[in-house]
Image (cartoon, helix red, strand yellow):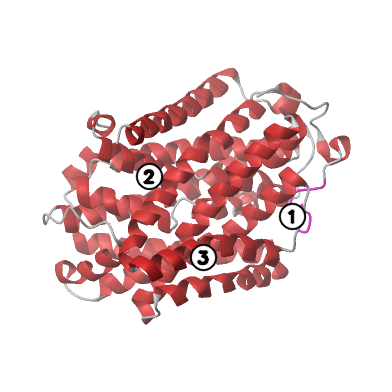
Amino acid sequence: MEFDGTSSRGEGDVGLRRSLEEVHGSVGIPSGGGWFRRFLAFCGPGYLVSVGYMDPGNWATCLAGGSKFGYTLLSVVLVSNLMAMVLQALSARLGIAAGMDLAQACRMHYRPWVGYVLWMACELAIIACDLAEVIGTALALHLLFGIPMVWGAVLTVLDAFLVLLLMRRGFRWLEAFIIVLILLISGCFAVQIAAASPRFSDLLGGLIPSAQIVRDPQMLYLAIGILGATVMPHNLYLHSSIVQTRAIDGSVAGRRSACRWAALDSSLALGMAFFVNAAILVLAAAVFHRAGRTDVAEIADAHALLSPPLGGGLAAGLFGVALLASGLNSTVTGTLAGQIVMEGFLDLRLKPWARRLLTRGLAVIPVVLVTAWTGEKATGPLLVLSQVILSMQLPFAVIPLVQFVSSRKVMGELVVPRWISAFAWGLAALVVGMNIRLLWDILRG
């Protein structure tokens, strides 16, 4: 893909409207005080991004991987999160250094037809992610309150109004809501892991990558599903935009400092996401795989089967609460990502509620049809498939991101060092290679 633009600095130079204009630069950064005050000022965007790394799609892939293969795929969760930390730090750097989000950069520096292709790929990724959120939230409502899956899926449309309410009160309110739900999810899994008592030696062994993952087509399929569920393509667009909600000092030194704070924020948040993802896989390995139940791939089955081995209904209840919190969290970030992508690629601005209803409607329809036709058992494979689709879209986001942050034309003095650029290109090659291998296995049946 070849650059096709003349400028890269600031909104006025390139004629771009500000990303998320209604909250752009709305969070103040203290000029004095200790490092902790500055850290708190920058803390928030990373947690919004981390939500996409612990959504219901992750539950399906990690649950299936843990029950079928024990702790083996734990290394994939670790590698995926490390990749995510690097890519999200680069995404934040693009937003801070270039003053534009990834979608805007694509529109500005690529030929129009390339931009449209990338936009369609990103929209497909958002719909696939939304599909996972609809299934997860509807399933949680069914497990906790007995609401039929079809009606639960329809009810998820109403979350557009939750986003509107939070955004109306200010971006920090939105971030606070997300962080509270993340802490709730983490607390639920901490209790369940303590009750499951996994073997520590097996857990550590699972963190070491195995060649069997590449050789076994079933294991590779789930591994790429975990990769797609962990490294979310639309999160790269999201992060490059929401870091601009901070009132950053526009000097080179000020932007360089902001890049460091943003990277710290996202790395800590993604560390918590790793705990949640690893906890799902470890829970499945310790409770189901250890007992010979290698066929547990459905979230509903996991919920029903948790109570007997863990000695009561508390574990199953916490499982359902965490799933509901995960689904609600993901809907918020999906709304923002959809808005950012549409505004950035097309310069088309819809009301947030209209944009949310549009993408959520496209996700609700297949869930309702599949559930009505085949019943709830088909939602598990649909969840895993949605994550594989996400993984297929990753190159369309990762390659432009790496190209932009490696370009002095786009980044100016904050262009990444060559060794970081080389490492990032290596990650991009790994993503593309894994997807090619998956496609080859699918074509071979």
The residue sitting at the left extreme is 292
Q: Position of residue 349 (x, y in %)?
A: 77, 55
Query: Which residue does the numbered mark 1 point to in the structure image?
Result: 28
What type is the residue that disc 1 sits on? Gly
Q: Is residue 178 visible?
A: yes
Mark 2–mark 1 distance (CA, rounded to whole Å) = 37 Å
Query: Which residue does the numbered mark 3 point to in the structure image?
Result: 364
Q: Position of residue 129 (x, y in %)?
A: 50, 53
Mark 3–mark 1 distance (CA, rounded to whole Å) = 38 Å
- Local crowd size for mark 1, using a 10 Å CA cut-off: few (<14), some (14–19), many (≥20): few
Q: Is residue 116 above or below residue 295?
A: above
> What SS does tag 3 mark?
helix
What type is the residue that disc 3 sits on? Val
* Residue 326 falls in image quadrant: bottom left
* Residue 176 falls in image quadrant: bottom right
- Magenta part of the protein: which range? 17-27
Q: Position of residue 260 (x, y in %)?
A: 61, 38
Query: Which residue does the numbered mark 2 point to in the structure image?
Result: 226
The residue sitting at the front extreme is 373
Q: Position of residue 133 (x, y in %)?
A: 48, 61
Pick whichever of labels 2 and 3 is earlier in the sequence.
Answer: 2
Q: In this orientation, which residue lies closer to the viewer: 77 or 89?
A: 77
Residue at horizontal 24 percent and vertical 70 percent from the top: 304
Q: Is residue 222 left or right of residue 411?
A: left
Query: Is residue 255 within the magenta segment?
Result: no
Q: Is residue 274 left or right of residue 217?
A: right
Pick whichever of labels 2 and 1 is earlier in the sequence.
Answer: 1
